[in-house]
Image: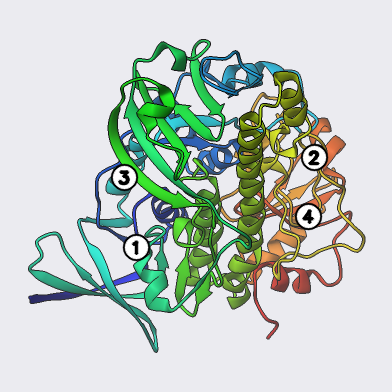
Amino acid sequence: MVTATVWQTPVLVVGAGTAGSVLALELAHHGVACMVIDRGGAAEPVGLAHLGGRSMELLRRLGLAAAVRRAGLDADAATDLVWRQRLDRPPVLIAQRPSVNQLRQLYATVNDGSAPAEHHQPIVEARLGQLLRGCLAASPLVDLREGWTATGVRVTPDGVAVTAADGSGEARHTIRARYVVGCDGAASTVRRCAGIELDALAGAHVRYRAIAFRSADLALHSRGPGLSTLVVGGATLLSRPQRHLWAAHLPLGAGELGEFLGSAVEVLGVQDWDDTLPVARLYRRGPVFLAGAAAHGFAPAGDTPDPGIGDAVNLGWKLAALHLGWGGPALLDSYEAERRPRALMDRELLARGLETRRRFGRLAAAGAPADYLAGFLRGEPALADDLGSGYCERYAASPVIRYERGHPPPPGPRITPSTWPGGRAPAVRLADGGQFFDRLGPQFTLVDLTGGGDGRALAAAARSRGLPVAHLPLDEPAVRACWGRRLVLVRPDQHVAWRDDAGLDDWDAVLDTVFGRQPD
């Protein structure tokens, strides 16, 4: 084995999946260079990613939303969730998730802060990966090394040293970085080397077999254009955009797929999984961080990269802040404080959905009539409208949020617009037709609704300390109506860091908190 040159980089990202790619692009968005190594491998043959509207808002900041939509499914494609006792029986219940165009029409005249800047977007995983890797390759700040595999991680006095083998198998490289982020999936080498353990969901667990297959069986056809998810007894079948391609999730012991469907199938791939839904006990150990599936193993139970995208953006701007000198150490502490609770909440929602499907299967097997099953499903929280859940994301216990006394307003049935600190700022269309989010700066933005530019001096005071705070005076009735305060400090990830009606004598203390800096 030949020892190659030692490489140096501010941040090393291990894994170029969705989370790793977005993290690297977030760093580049702030002008920070990084190296990305990725071992590669065969893509899931029928993988489909459901990007939520909140993820699309975060990608919009990076200039990627339009490209993702061009590469994604048609904006008229809706998603049916069809519940059946058996394939040869009529549906018990059909729930339809609106298409992107239907949502655009629904929100066309709404401008009270509850209309999101972006809606969801389904996209074939391979296309999303190709798009993101193309962006990495095109960025002058990203050094992408494909075919490289991390083999060891060692913390050093000035950061971390990672050993990696390249695709030739003849050279072993050493990469020295200030920080390393493991975005290398559920079997993360970075997590293992860092000695970080996983916490599984408590309780008895069920093992499943995920099967990618091709079938022309007419019983599987969708009601119309779009995608279908069929819950049949105890199994889940998911249609894919490619003709006759499906994915199935069957509890182990339920028999062969062909026997279950009653027709011949062409199996394209098989993967076993269970519903332990593990979450890492730590998201950080010194200069070593975890993000995406390395931090929370939700796939294939969840078919969305949303948690990983949230991790990547949250950690990316904070690492950039430390590297560029305007962020303090508490920013890095806040990554786990903000993102791990979110993963635990996501896990509970996934577990609740899986349990609903299992209970439906048991009731169907017991001979429950269709009207009884339909009533059971309508009473299940797992079937509630979740279109606004991502937009209500709120960090409730972060060391870098300046909270107010009292309690935030409870989330509504869809989206509750509020600038309560820790929450995502309300998205509003401006009088000129543009989106408010597009007016925010790349770092912090002080939104000034005082009418007299009272926030100008506050922003200037921040900049005099080397803290990047843009001043955004607005005279927009739609913003005033839902923002609740005249001065609102918004973070790079569009979350509210602080708000008030007037500048405070302790403005320096506010800045120390939200930038993670300790007073001198």
SS under mark 2? loop
Question: In whole angstroms, how far apart are the C-alphas of marks 4 and 3?
Answer: 40 Å
Q: Is residue 141 left or right of residue 447?
A: left
At 54% from the left and 27% from the top, the residue drawn is 232
Q: Nearer the viewer, residue 5 or 517?
A: 5
SS under mark 4? loop
The residue indicated by pointer 1 is 14
Residue 175 appears in which quarter of the rendering? bottom left
Q: Is residue 513 left or right of residue 58?
A: right
Crowding around mark 2 (Cα neighbors within 10 Å: few <14, some 14 to 19, many 20+) is: many
Crowding around mark 3 (Cα neighbors within 10 Å: few <14, some 14 to 19, many 20+) is: some
At 62% from the left and 49% from the top, the residue drawn is 351
* The label number, if any, that marks residue 455 in the structure image: 4
At 43% from the left and 31% from the top, the residue drawn is 123
Question: In whole angstroms, how far apart are the C-alphas of marks 2 and 1?
Answer: 37 Å
Task: Tell me the mark number nearer the camera, choosing from 2 and 1.
Answer: 1
* The label number, if any, that marks residue 417 in the structure image: 2
Asked whether the viewer can see residue 487, the reply is: yes
Q: Is residue 132 left or right of residue 317?
A: left
State whether residue 136 is above or below residue 502: above
